[in-house]
């Protein structure tokens, strides 16, 4: 029998994708800083002009899964990290946005076979979000650590290959001539 475990740092020179929401960027930029610090300290160069980490900014958490799925399907990345902050106090949108980003990230990861880290803070207040984004601890650091562990773990699992780009489903509807 076997025990499979990830290690830090990951073997080789893995690439990571980070998808960040601009909504609540007071929080998400802090999560990003924590993430970059962790990656750097584990031998991954987070420089956006380097070759190891690519960044994609999206308007809000709702848009994160689409972009994460596209990055994952490219097969370019050992793991993707999603950073967002959904805060209940601000709007009744909370439940919809939180549910969609959660479901979307899980679906994208399962469909592509690429680890996609759920780095979405869901809190009742801005104060709680701030506490998790640097005041007390920085969850961004943990999310990066999770990405390193999962990237490494996936390399060790039986059947691991670098398959060609995944085909995402559902594909966009094809309109017939009469509908155009
Ligand atoms: N996006 C967030 O990332 N966090 C939120 O708290 C939030 N709230 O509460 O509205 C939020 N809304 C924007 C949403 O993610 C989309 O960007 C927008 O609806 C456009 O599709």
Image (cartoon, rainbow, N blue to C red):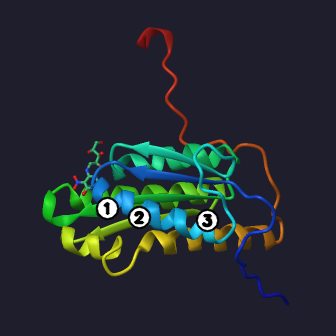
- From the image, tell me which residue sits under label 2: 31
- Residue at 57%, 43% (x, y): give it: 70
The reply to whether the residue tagged 2 has its Cβ within 8 angstroms of ligand 1 is no
- What residue appears at the point 53 percent right and 41 percent down from the top-left corner? 170
User: From mark 3 to mark 1, how far is it between C-alphas?
Assistant: 20 Å
Q: Residues within 10 Å of mark 3 (few under 14, many from 20)?
A: some
Query: To which residue does mark 1 refer?
Result: 27
Mark 3 and mark 2: Cα distance apart in space? 14 Å
- 38, above or below 85, in the image: below
Q: Quadrant of residue 104?
A: bottom left
Q: Is residue 79 left or right of residue 12?
A: left
Counting residues from the start of the chain, the first of labels 3 and 1 encountered is 1
Query: In front: mark 3 or mark 2?
Result: 3
Picture quarter with the C terminus: top left
- The x and y percentages for residue 119 are 44, 65
Which residue corresponds to mark 3? 40
Which secondary structure lies at badge 1?
A: helix
Kindly identify which numbered label has been placed on residue 62: none
Q: Is residue 149 left or right of residue 100?
A: right
Q: Residue at x 49, y 44 (%)?
A: 56
Q: Is residue 32 above or below residue 6?
A: above
**Residue 79's x, y, as percent?**
63, 59
Nearer to us in this view, 108 or 35? 35
* Quarter in which the N terminus is drawn: bottom right
Q: Residue at x 31, y 61 (%)?
A: 27
Disc 2, SS = helix
- CB under 8 Å between discs 2 and 1: yes
């Amino acid at each position: 029998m076997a025990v499979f475990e990830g290690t830090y740092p990951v073997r080789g020179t893995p690439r990571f994708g980070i998808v960040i929401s601009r909504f609540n960027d007071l929080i998400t930029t802090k999560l990003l800083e924590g993430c970059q610090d962790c990656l750097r300290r584990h031998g991954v160069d987070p420089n956006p002009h380097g070759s190891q980490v690519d960044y994609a900014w999206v308007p809000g958490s709702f848009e994160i899964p689409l972009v994460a799925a596209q990055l994952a399907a490219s097969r370019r990345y050992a793991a993707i990290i999603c950073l967002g902050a959904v805060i209940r106090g601000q709007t009744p949108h909370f439940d919809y946005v939180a549910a969609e980003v959660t479901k979307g990230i899980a679906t994208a990861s399962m469909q592509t076979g690429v680890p996609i880290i759920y780095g979405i803070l869901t809190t009742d207040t801005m104060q709680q979000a701030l506490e998790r984004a640097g005041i007390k601890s920085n969850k961004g650091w943990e999310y990066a650590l999770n990405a390193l562990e999962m990237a490494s773990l996936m390399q060790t699992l039986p059947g691991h290959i670098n398959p060609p780009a995944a085909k995402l489903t559902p594909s966009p509807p094809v309109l017939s001539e009469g509908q155009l």
